Amino acid sequence: MKPLKTATEIRDAIKNEAAGILGWPPGADVMIWPDGKTWKVTFLTVDPERDEQLKFRVEGLAQFMRDRIDLAPTPIITGGYANSSDMA
């Protein structure tokens, strides 16, 4: 069984690893989301031409990590808003 990590933990690990090699440009980010029994990654940037090499690095790191780490389930929060009559 693979260890579980949150989307934030996976994103931070990918960004830290990629930044250590190529640096991390302003305006770039990584988004992680569940996809069936696995997870997907998207590299977001304001300058795709400048960041093409970094995009490939992020995608490679994600594939490497996907084989070794599962995305932890995200709790669903429902309701919870107090109406004015509940407040005294």
Image (cartoon, grey):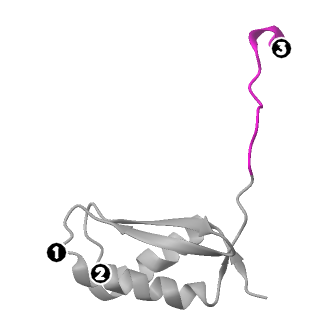
- Which secondary structure lies at badge 2? helix
The residue at the point 73 percent across, 86 percent down is 2
* CA distance separating discs 2 and 1: 9 Å
Q: Is residue 72 above or below residue 78?
A: below
| 16 and 43: which is toward the camera | 43
| SS for dot 3 | helix
Rounded to the nearest angstrom, the CA distance separating label 3 from label 1 is 54 Å
Residue labelled with disc 1 = 50
Q: Residues within 10 Å of mark 2 (few under 14, many from 20)?
A: many
Q: Which residues are magenta?
A: 76-88
Picture coordinates of residue 48, whole percent (x, y): 21, 70
Judge from the rendering whether residue 42 lies leftward or rightward of residue 11; answer left or right. Answer: left
Residue beneath the point at 49% across and 82% down: 62
Which residue is denoted by mark 2 in the rendering? 54
Of the residues shown, which amino acid type is indicated by label 1?
Arg
* Residue 7 point in image, percent of width and height: 59, 66
Horizontal side of 60 relative to 27 (left or right) equals right
Q: Residue at (80%, 13%) from the top-left corner?
A: 87
| Residue at disc 1, secondary structure | loop
48, 25: nearer the viewer: 48
Q: Is residue 81 above or below residue 74?
A: above
Q: Amino acid at mark 2?
A: Leu
The kind of secondary structure the magenta stretch mainly shows is loop
Front of the two marks 2 and 3? 2
Of labels 2 and 3, earlier in sequence is: 2
Please provide percent x and percent y for residue 55.
Answer: 32, 79
In terms of image quadrants, where is residue 16? bottom left
Question: Which residue corresponds to mark 3?
Answer: 86
